[in-house]
Image (tube, rainbow, N blue to C red):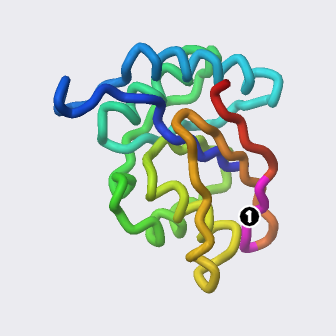
């Protein structure tokens, strides 16, 4: 299983150029944790981008669900990075992983995994703090469910 999660709401860069999570974003993660608990959400690791809002979302997710999964910084996951290399890395992973990142990176990554490169223009929009569960189906992936912060 692979879980793709977009970071929660962050403060604007006018307030803080590092763009940490806002109080709204922190509440979004708490609400998503309440929805994920009954889904059996239990990744072996939680990967996140180098950006503060992604790392903070990942940390709140792990804490909010009481997971033992370590947080792992992963290069190549910033908003404008090319997700093709990352898709190859995910394809070789046999464990259940949660990936906390950004748009448009996650939307393109989901499309590559589900549809393959020939239909990579089909785009999966990710609302902030949303989690998409993907199940491996041979060389492709199938969408199982989507959880969004209410």
Q: What residue appears at the point 57 percent right and 47 percent down from the top-left corner? A: 126
Please give left or right for residue 127 compared with residue 78 in the image: right
Across and down, in percent, residue 45 comes to 56, 37
Please give left or right for residue 75 compared with residue 134 in the image: left
Question: What residue occupies the far bottom of the structure in this picture?
Answer: 118
Please give left or right for residue 65 compared with residue 135 in the image: left
Q: What residue appears at the point 45 percent right and 65 percent down from the top-left corner? A: 83
Q: What residue appears at the point 75 percent right and 21 percent down from the top-left corner? A: 37
Across and down, in percent, residue 18 comes to 21, 31
Q: Secondary structure at mark 1?
A: strand
Residue picked out by circle 1: 141
Q: What residue appears at the point 38 percent right and 31 percent down from the top-left corner? A: 55
Within 10 Å of disc 1 (Cα), the crowding (few <14, some 14-19, many 20+) is many
Q: Quadrant of the C terminus?
A: top right
Q: Quadrant of residue 20?
A: top left
Q: Is residue 2 above or below residue 141?
A: above
Please give left or right for residue 145 compared with residue 148 in the image: right
Q: Is residue 106 above or below residue 66?
A: below
> Is residue 48 visible to us here?
yes
Which residues fall within the magenta stretch? 139-143
């Amino acid at each position: 299983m692979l879980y793709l999660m977009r970071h929660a709401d962050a403060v604007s860069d006018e307030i803080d150029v590092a763009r940490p999570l806002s109080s709204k974003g922190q509440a979004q993660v708490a609400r998503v944790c309440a929805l994920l608990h009954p889904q059996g959400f239990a990744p072996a690791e939680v990967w996140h981008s180098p950006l503060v809002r992604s790392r903070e979302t990942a940390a709140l997710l792990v804490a909010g669900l009481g997971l033992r999964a370590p947080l792992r910084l992963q290069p190549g996951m910033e908003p404008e990075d090319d997700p093709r290399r990352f898709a190859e890395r995910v394809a070789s992973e046999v464990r259940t992983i949660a990936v906390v990142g950004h748009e448009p990176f996650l939307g393109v990554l989901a499309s590559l995994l589900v549809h393959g490169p020939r239909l990579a223009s089909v785009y999966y929009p990710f609302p902030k703090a949303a989690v998409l569960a993907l199940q491996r189906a041979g060389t492709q992936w199938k969408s199982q469910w989507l959880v969004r912060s209410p």
